[in-house]
Amino acid sequence: MENPGPEIKYPPGERINEISSAGIGTEEVMTMASEEKAGKPACLYEFVQGACDWGLADPPPRVLVLKLDEQGEVQRQVFDGSPCDTRGVEALEIYNTGPGLSPEDTVIFYSGAREEDRYDGFGRRQGSHGRGTTISLTYLALLGVPVEIESNYQGRPWTGRTRLTPTTTGRTRVLTVDGEWEEGERNYTIFRILKPPPGIVGSLNRLPQRYLEANPRYKRARLVPVLPKAGTPYTQAVDKGMVELLDAGTVEFEGILPVVFCDKKAVATNSWDYFVLPWAIEGFADATDPSLRVRRGIASDELEGRGSAGCIVTRVLANCEDPEVFERLFRAIDQARKRTSYIQPREATGSILPERTGVKPAVSSAVQKAWVDCYGNAAVTMDPSLERVGGEELVPIRVAGDGLYNFLRACGIRDGADVLKITKKEKASSLLKKR
């Protein structure tokens, strides 16, 4: 018989008072402050990730912008991914339906309120509303921004409000949630950020470029309505997982290409600090091949498992027979490198070649067609000193990392050094004939 969890014995009206260990000076909170200062919407991201992780598909999770109209009535506008005016915002609501969280989930880093939660080897829960939400609530409290919470535990409703409380000695202040249990039933959760400063509202406008679920151009987005002309990524299953090649413009390219990871439940989470290629990857926690076995770590910017994202991406490339995929990939990387000739992000190295089998003829043909469409008669090299872009030799050369270089060479793309030798020889021969 499954464990239904502890029975709630608190009657309606019973007060709630949860005190956290997170407060002024907590490392994770200071890290979030640094990320916010750098322009990353880290605070709101934690709220919306939890809403997408645990929200039901119908109705879907949403962010609502609350403003007052001319009559002083509150008007709620659904955030659709387009920029919203940061002026006059009374509150932001992060809303989702479905099983809620317990009051203590808001103040502790690792909790186990749900039977289906994923745990690491130390018994700590990964993801969910716990850790990231506590950090965000504390960060907002440090800014003097209270958050009202409406949620449910096992269907029983409760409300709360955040504040900072001095510790016994007065040495610091920590996050506290005060509230009460209510009557009836509830099947939704709302985090209502009251009087958010312009910086927090502004981070909402940046969210679509940092988190796929909030990007209306992504066909599988859940946090915002998807645009009719949303991109249809190339999708390929690899063992038990799935990968997608994202359209350039779906994610933010700033000289590096973010790769978005998803956990076993296919819940998208953006990774701030790990970059490979413009791919969305999900469902690989239980991949058959150990080299593909990756999953989101406790923190969203960490990966766990024996495999690597690079192995997953290269496995797809080595079996891809669609020229459009390679062409989109080349152009996206070119765009991300800000017009440099590098066609390989620095982190994406290692062998792309399948063991023993080599490259299939259909794959080689697809690569060659995409290469010609993108670069004409260009050659490839790993040596930046050989790079030429229509220079004296009239032979464009693109520089690639070793993994992509070996793959392109195996697909029949000419080597830059060999081409330069040929052109020099041809040029010398031409000069002799003229004499």
Image (cartoon, rainbow, N blue to C red):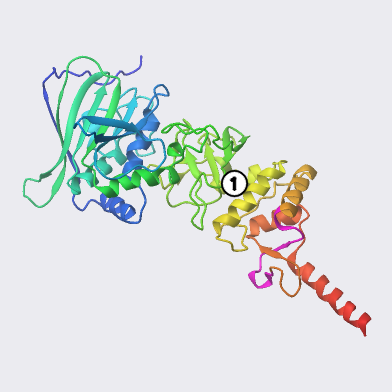
Q: Is residue 56 above or below residue 284?
A: above
Q: Quadrant of the C terminus?
A: bottom right
Q: Nearer the viewer, residue 239 or 246?
A: 246
Hey, which quadrant is residue 391 in on the image?
bottom right
Q: Position of residue 183 (x, y in %)?
A: 17, 16
How busy is the neighbourhood of tag 1: few (under 14 within 10 Å), some, or many (20 plus)? some
Q: Quadrant of the N terminus?
A: top left
Camera sees residue 60:
yes
Q: Residue at x 51, y 41 (%)?
A: 294
Q: Nearer the viewer, residue 153 or 428?
A: 428
Q: Residue at x 34, y 27 (%)?
A: 96
Q: Is residue 426 above or below residue 370?
A: below
Numbered disc total: 1
- Whether 106 is among the magenta residues is no
Q: Residue at x 31, y 56 (%)?
A: 37
Hey, which quadrant is residue 81 in on the image?
top left
Quick check: 10 left or right of 56? Answer: left
Q: Which residues are magenta?
A: 374-388
Under mark 1, the amino acid is Cys
Q: Position of residue 323 (x, y in %)?
A: 72, 44
Q: Residue at x 72, y 55 (%)?
A: 408
Q: Position of residue 393 (x, y in %)?
A: 76, 73
Quick check: 165 left or right of 43? Answer: left
Q: Position of residue 371 (x, y in %)?
A: 72, 53
Quick check: 277 left or right of 152? Answer: right
Q: Residue furthest left?
A: 169
- Whether 382 is among the magenta residues is yes
User: Circle 1 — which element?
Assistant: helix
Quick check: 429 left or right of 111? Answer: right
Q: Nearer the viewer, residue 335 or 361?
A: 335
Residue at mark 1: 311
Camera sees residue 127:
no
